[in-house]
Amino acid sequence: MKKIILVAALFSTLLFAQTKEKVEVPYVPFPIKMGEGFDAIQTHCLMCHSFGYITNQGRQSKEFWHKKVVKMVVHFKAPMDEKAVQETTDYLFEHYGNGKLK
Amino acid sequence: MERREFFKKAAVVAGAAAVGTSTAKAGVTEQPIDDRQVSPIAFPEKRPLIMYSDRPPLLETPRDVFTSALTPNDQFFVRWHMPDIPTHIDPDTFTISVNGLVDKEMKISLNDLKTDFEQVEVTAVLQCGGNSRSAFKPIAGGIQWGSGAMGCARWKGVRLRDVLDRAGLHKDAVWVGFNGSEKSAYYETPEFIRELELSELDDHVILAYEMNGEDLPYLNGYPLRLVIPGYYSDSWIKMLSNITVTNKYRKLFFMDVAYRVPDNETESETPEKRFSKTKPIKKMNVKSIIGYPTKDSIITHKSHVVIRGVAWDSGHGIKDVMVSVDGGKTWEKALLDDGKQGRYGYRAFRYTFKPTEFGKVTLMSKAISKLGEEQPFAKDIKWNHGGYKYNGIDEVTVEVV
């Protein structure tokens, strides 16, 4: 009898585990290059998405990164002024650029 | 896990997420990236998968999972758009709102959905419109998915039509908008709302609470998601919380700017000359993928190898899958499964082959739909700025030893 109760208890725990407890999505520290402009990246990019979004794009042109930053401002309404757009673009091109302007 | 060990593992993970340096000639589409490693970090209710981001969570299913018609829940890909997903939803108090141009606005509980409506099931492929995006050259901005931003499941729930009928549609109802519980960091960021025309939503469209016989996994949209068989996943709203019926199309970022392709016959353009008129990606094209062998498989000379994979389209059904074991020179029909999952699901295929030569051999699969639509070679797929709808003939190169 004892055994049956134990099994039943275990079963119900499994059954409701998904919904009764808060789900913890792990934090993953993505390696990101340090350097001038990093503060801007941390302030303006990380609010909405991990650095995985940046590193996954691979090395790209200055124009590519500029368009990405502008997209975040125009479409996703990131609160960034001209200076912030410039700083983030420069950082991205410096550390994740392919050397080409276009 | 020790903190230091965690960071060490995380570094490995993120390294895997970096895009392979492209030596490709500009403008020529190649095979999608196929060398990403599974992350050592498992997300809730998931086995370790290929990981691109933790916030929002982006997880890809490894190739070797695609050998059967259904994709296990714990290996099913994950894609969210916003950083803030509720970390707890109480199924006892959860409700979905139906409002707008209806006779009576409703809030329906999960229990009511399960007990007060006809329960229906459909097997359907869920594929990101940007699946295989890494095939496009030059880079099409966005997550550089390999081939695993997709899966196929048996979904159970209630018909959208039944829910709308219960609320009573007004005569002038034309559009229906769906949104879920994910939230952006900034109030001004557009919400992830999808808007579809009522006339295009048939009885196969369901509000699903179950996936492969289990509750939806949290990261796949627990407790309720929209299922639109044949359509790319951008319209399959997760954690569905609201349905609004309107007579006017609302301007929406995720409808008007994202998930669109050039509105021309080949749905293509060039980076230098973008095509200004665009249309939503909507219905999936015909595609197949080899699940076994993979590039890491050890294939022994003169052994009996069974090549396995899956093929699908938007619901016309798969007529044939052709397999080549000589790099595309000759093709033979693969054996298809019984098709009992229905026309919206994967058709699993298999092909037996006995390698008689040593060295590298390139295996290919090409699906043909009942409409006669056929997968093109990767190199013949033309570029579009969003990197959507890649469906090139799949290739796996293995070494026979």
Image (cartoon, rainbow, N blue to C red):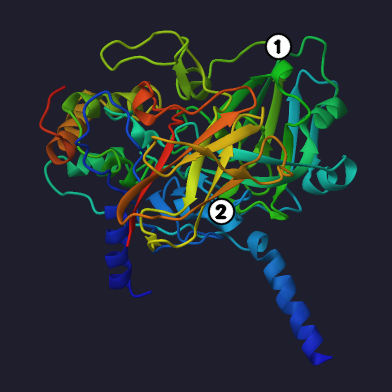
Q: Badge 1, how many Cα within 10 Å: few under 14, some, many 20+?
A: some
Q: Nearer the viewer, residue B220 or B62?
A: B62
Q: Earlier in the sequence, mark 2 or mark 1?
A: 2
Q: Is residue B232 left or right of residue A2?
A: left
**Chain ID for label 1?**
B
In the rendered image of this protein, does residue B236 appear above or below residue B27? Answer: below
Disc 1 on helix, strand or loop?
loop
Q: Position of residue B164 (x, y in %)?
A: 81, 27
Q: Amino acid at mark 1?
A: Asn
Where residue B235 sits, quadrant-wise, is top right
Q: CA distance from mark 2 to mark 1?
A: 34 Å
- Considering only vertical position in the picture, is B317 above or below B168? below
- Does residue B41 appear to the left or right of B181 in the view shown? left
Question: Which of the chains bears the disc numbered 2?
Answer: B
Viewport quadrant of the C terminus of chain B: bottom left
Identity, as a three-letter code, of the amino acid under mark 2: Thr
Residues at discs 2 and 1 both on one chain:
yes
Number of numbered discs on residues = 2
In this rendered view, identify the residue nearer to me: B50 or B177: B50
Q: Residue under circle 2?
A: B87
Task: Tell me if residue B61 can be seen.
Answer: no
Q: Name the residue nearer the viewer: A95 or B343.
A: B343
Looking at the rendered structure, the secondary structure element under dot 2 is loop
* Residue at left offset 28%, top offset 17%: B271
A43 or B172: nearer the viewer: B172
The residue under label 1 is: B247
